[in-house]
Each structure stands twice: as structure tokens, then as C-alpha cells.
Amino acid sequence: MKPSNLNRGRKVVVGMSGGVDSSVSAWLLKQQGFEVIGLFMKNWEEDDTSEYCSSRQDWLDAVSVADLVGVDIEAVNFSAEYKDRVFAEFLREYSAGRTPNPDVLCNAEIKFKAFLDHAMSLGADLIATGHYARVRPSQADPKRFELLKGLDATKDQSYFLHRLNQTQLAHSCFPIGEIPKTQVRQIAQEIGLHNAAKKDSTGICFIGERPFREFLNQYLPSDPGPIKTLDQAVVGTHHGLSFYTLGQRKGLGVGGIRGYQQADGSGPTWYVAKKDLPTNTLYVVPEHDHPCLLSRTLSAQQSSWIAGVAPACMASYGVKTRYRQVDTPANLKQADANEFVLDFEQSQWAVTPGQSAVVYDGEVCLGGGIIN
């Protein structure tokens, strides 16, 4: 690939995590003629030396890639901003009985705010990340920008980027949004990147692969209470409502219960159906498709619309209520700057308060909000 003269002199700061996606992104931009600077973000310090947080190795990997690609790289510590803007909200949400998605907030507050501000101070024209998404000028108004799904449907990450605004999108690019993951790894192998086969990150650094309950116990008090069926029968004891999420079936400690045995003598699988904070009670149901786990409507708060205004109401859109979910048809019943309501054509399973409901018009991500 020959460098393009069109981009000569334009500076791009690339968020380099040490993974294959951001590494190939840096290489592609260099090939396109941009002046490329790598930036490694350190966002967590609490137990950075533990077996669960790989930031030191990630930094070494990023430096190695920068050397091969031929770009300068620096490390910037955003851990204070992360703790204030992301982790504090993460704990507040769990304390309130909801299940937050910190990746969504991290993108809006750190990767496309603190990182963007720092890059602009370096004289950057654009920032780039290894997200599987795309950005383009709006067909209706070229001065405005649209966020699109990544072309690799199995890796599309627009769900996590739905809170980005016009200013952020105007200064962002996603070099691998147009290509499949298999091709990204192939490029990495062809140019000799040592991390070509590196395993994809499975989560944010401060959680990683560690036992989640053990981690949360460090920051939130354990508050045991009863586990009940909907007819108020006590069937167990929970460790604290913060440790459970709607639809959860593992780790409940609920075994065979009199009156619920099946014909062969086995018991049903139990699912979390509701969390009652005032009584500190966890309610469970014995069926995956129990009516308590099915919803035809939802309301969401903290609306964030990429265009700056809510999309037209009384129209059908595609909606995701969790990452990797297939777009589900829903009618946008009402929407404003703070809240919106969706009516689904078919019942949705385990719509979880604290997660994001993200709205799409075909391949265009319109924005979303936090499920009530």
C-alpha cells in the first residue's frame, strides 16, 4: 500500500492498547500517509500488579508494535479521570441495584474525551482507535457526522460508542471498521507483528478475568438477604443484591424445592427475576421464559443522540438492549433530551436496568440511553 499524498501533514493520534486491532490501525494510518503518534492509556492503578491486570505487558506490546510500524508512542495516565468519571458511576449503579456497562461510559468520558483533549493539545487533526465501527459525513448534511456499524457484524462495536457526540465524531476515525477481523489478523501476520495472534481483551482492565463477586466485595459491602419465589417462599440466601443481574442462573445456590420437582424428579433451573431493594430480597422464577422475564416495552434515561436531537417518534427502528444482540424491531413511542420509550414487536428477555438500549436506523447508530 503506497502512502497517500492527500493525508500528508495531517496528524493522527492512535490509541494503542497493545492489542492487534489498534496495532493494525496504526499501521494502516501510516500507510495512508498520516503523521501517526501512538498513545497508550493507563486507566487503572488499584491492583495493577495483580494477575488479572495486564497493563504492563500491554505497554511492552504497544512499544514493540510502535517500533515496528515506525511511530513514536507515549504513555498517558488517565487513572484519576477514570476513577472519578467511570468507576465511581459503576459503583453507584451497582449500589442502586442496576447492572451498568462501564465500557460505554469509558468511551464517552475517557477514550473520546480525556484522550481526545490530550491529542488535540498535541496538535492532532484526528484520533483513531481499533474499534469495529465507521464514521462518515451525513448524507443529509455533510457538516454533520454519522456513526455506522462495523462491516464485520460479528465484531461491530457501535453499541459501545452510542454516546459519542458530533464534536467527538468529527475528530475520530476507525481504520479497521471497513474490514473483517480475520483480515486484521492476516495483515498483522503479513507485516510481522508479534501480537498477531494475541487473544482479544475480554473486559476492562479492573475486572479482567477475576471472580466478579470477589472484586466487587472490595468496594461494596456485602448485605445478605432472602431469595424468594414469587409466592414468597424463602428458598435461599443471597450475598447482596449488587452481585446479581436480571436473568442470571448461575451461582444462585438454589437447589431442589418442594413443589417444583419435574416428572423425572429433577428440579427446574432458577433465574433472577427481580431485585427488591427496600426489603433486600432477590426474587427467582423456575423458567427461562417466565412472564416476569419478558418485556414488550422499556423506558430509558440519560438519552444521548448522536445527531444532537432525538430521532422521529412513532417510527420503527432496530434496537439492541445488550451487546451482540441481533437488532430487534421496536417503535420509538416518545423521546426527548432526557428519556425515551420503546415498544417492541416481540417480547424481549431479561431487559436489564443499567444496561444500554441502543437505537439503529439500518446500519446507522442513532444513539441510546440507560434502561430504567
Image (tube, rainbow, N blue to C red):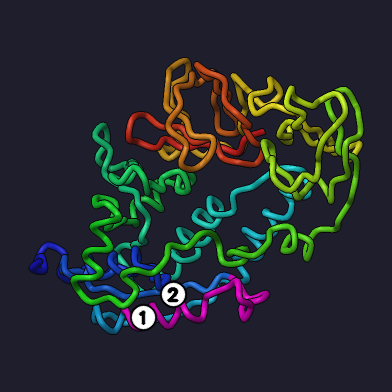
Q: Residues within 10 Å of mark 1 (few under 14, many from 20)?
A: many
Q: How crowded is mark 2: few (under 14 residues within 10 Å), some or many (20 or more)?
A: many
| Quadrant in which the N terminus appears | bottom left
Q: Magenta includes 54?
A: yes
Start-end of magenta stretch: 44-65
Image-based side of 131 in relation to 253, left or right: left
Q: In this view, does 120 lie above or below 132?
A: below
State which tag comes first along the sequence, 2 or 1.
Answer: 2
Q: Is residue 295 above or below residue 11?
A: above
Amino acid carrying mark 2 in the image: Phe
Q: Which of 77 and 55 is in front in this view?
A: 55
**Image coordinates for residue 41, horizontal then vertical, percent:** 48, 72
Q: Magenta includes 202?
A: no
Query: Residues at badges 2 and 1 in contact (C-beta under 8 Å)?
Result: yes
Q: Which of 27 and 238 is in front in this view?
A: 238
Q: Mark 2 points at which residue?
A: 40
Q: Name the residue under label 1.
A: 73
What residue is drawn where x is 41% and y is 48%?
157
Amino acid carrying mark 1 in the image: Ile
What residue is drawn where x is 62% and y is 81%?
49
Q: Nearer the viewer, residue 93 or 334?
A: 93
* Snapshot quadrant of residue 64: bottom left
What residue is drawn where x is 42% and y is 27%?
318
